[in-house]
Image: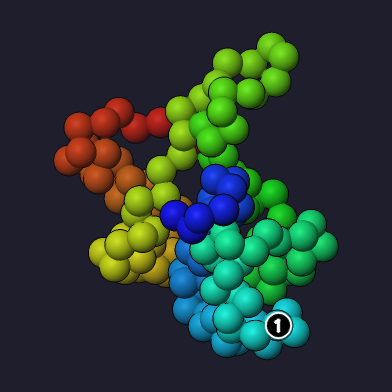
Amino acid sequence: MTNNANKIDIYVGGRVKARRQVLGISQEKLGGALGVTFQQVQKYEKGSNRISASRLQQIGAVLGVPAAYFFEGLQGLTGGLSGFAEEAQAPFKNDIISTDEGMQLMRAFLRIEDPSVRRRIIELVESIAGTPAEVA
């Protein structure tokens, strides 16, 4: 973790990095599309430089996702402040996207076009892991 980086900035940057890697886009290519250097993209991804709302919207457009994508699963990092009537949820784990195996698995999975095959793969992995399948 960087010295003064905020947990949310690190999380959002990690989501940017993961999406970029899933798509096979280099930091240089993303930086070029945004009009910034690859070093700036690195700082965004590490959370050492905050990403403005307009820049996040631009990044989402380049990576093919809405800006809200970068905040999905963030509830657990907000220090338990989930709103007046909501209970804090468990934090989302980014662990799979930080491993080579996880990235390979995600890329291969995304190439499967048949939704029923994708569902069966999820059920297989969940049965091996010993976790119940969730209804999407």
Residue 103 visible in the snapshot? yes
Quadrant hosting residue 31: bottom right
Snapshot colouring: rainbow
Q: Mark 1 points at which residue?
A: 36
Q: In this view, does 132 lie to the left or right of 38?
A: left
Residue 19 visible in the snapshot? no
Report x, y in % for residue 45: 55, 65
Q: Which residue lies furthest to the right in this view?
A: 54
Report x, y in % for residue 76: 52, 32
78 shown above or below 49: above
Q: Which residue is drawn at 61% across and 66% down?
A: 44
20 shown above or below 52: below
Q: How many marks?
A: 1
Q: In this view, does 27 lie to the left or right of 69?
A: left
Q: Residue furthest front?
A: 3
Question: In front: 98, or 47?
Answer: 47
The amino acid on which the numbered mark 1 sits, given as a three-letter code, is Val
Report x, y in % for residue 95: 35, 51
Report x, y in % for residue 5: 56, 53
Q: Which residue is drawn at 50% across and 55% down?
A: 3
Q: Is residue 4 left or right of residue 127?
A: right
Q: Quadrant of the N terminus?
A: bottom left
Q: Is residue 131 left or right of residue 31?
A: left
Q: Residue at x 26, y 39 (%)?
A: 126
Q: Residues within 10 Å of mark 1 (few under 14, many from 20)?
A: some
Q: Residue at x 75, y 84 (%)?
A: 35
Q: Residue furthest top?
A: 85
Question: In front: 42, or 5?
Answer: 5
Question: For the residue labelled by badge 1, is the local secondary structure a helix, a strand or a loop?
Answer: loop
